[in-house]
Image (cartoon, rainbow, N blue to C red):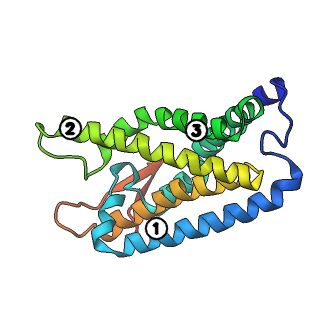
Amino acid sequence: LIGRMAGLTWPELGLGLPTLQRGTQVAGAAALTVAMLIAIAVAIPITRGAFRDTRYRLGLRAALYTSLVAIPLGTVLFEEMAFRGVLWGLLDRDFGVLDATVASACLFGLWHMLPALDLARTHTSVRGAATARPRRVAITVLATMAFTTIAGVVFAELRWRSGSLVAPIGLHWATNGLGVLAAARVWAISAGDAGTPQASASVGSVTQPAWQ
């Protein structure tokens, strides 16, 4: 609505019908690539720990809900419409592709400052001695902002080259949504390890056991 009020057309918002098929193809290829990379990372013990985020110590039902409902509707669609739809479209119209990509990516990185603080609180790799924690938190926040800025560039490139917002939506969901499923699976398969108690998570009033 904001983009349309600002005078952007549906194609300028990345929502034009002519580019829908191309965007869907790119989204599917990107999601498949991410799925394969995540599967490899989960299978290798040395990289498996990267998925031990306590926010996603979930049972199957809760993990599926988070991945397929909460993340697409609560995060991906909003962020892509805001950053690669309206913001990128307005900047591209007024300043060109390069400025639109750089500015939207930098703002996307800044947008993730608060989520990075939450990640520092919940991810097992960041926890440690109290004296070391402030430094670890600072590194986590800066690294997260840098990563999401780079991700913003990639998302914007997909948006530009495909002409469709569907392409970055697909990659964005795959990174976040499949990451949640991977994290839940890692917690499940490591439930028997020392110091990793089996956990549960709830959806509404229903408690879900960890994956088995």
Q: Residue 23 location, x and y as percent? A: 75, 58
Residue for badge 3: 102
Q: Depth check: give the residue in front, 198 or 71.
A: 71
Count residues near mark 3 (Cα–Cα under 10 Å), then give few for <14, some for 14-19, many for 20+. some
Residue mark closest to the camera, 2 vs 1: 2
Quadrant of residue 48 within the rendered picture: bottom left
Could you tell whether 134 is left or right of 103 in the image?
left
100 vs 157: above or below: above
> SS for tag 2?
helix
What crowding class fits label 1: few (fewer than 14 Cα within 10 Å), some (14-19), or many (20 or more)? many
Report whether 44 appears left or right of 88. Answer: left
Q: Earlier in the sequence, mark 2 or mark 3?
A: 3
Three-letter amino acid code of the residue under disc 3: Val
Q: Is residue 178 left or right of residue 146?
A: right
Q: Residue at x 28, y 66 (%)?
A: 191
Left or right relative to 108: residue 86:
right
Q: Which residue is mark 2?
A: 135
Residue at x 53% of width, y 52% of height: 66
Location of the C terminus (image quadrant): bottom left
Q: Amino acid at mark 2?
A: Arg
Q: Is residue 10 visible?
A: yes
First-in-chain label (3 vs 1): 1
Q: Which residue is mark 1?
A: 38
Q: CA distance from mark 2 to mark 1?
A: 28 Å
Residue 26 locus on image (x, y percent): 70, 63
Query: Counting residues from the N terminus, which is met first, the one under dot 2 or under dot 1?
Result: 1
Alpha carbon distance from label 2 to label 3: 28 Å
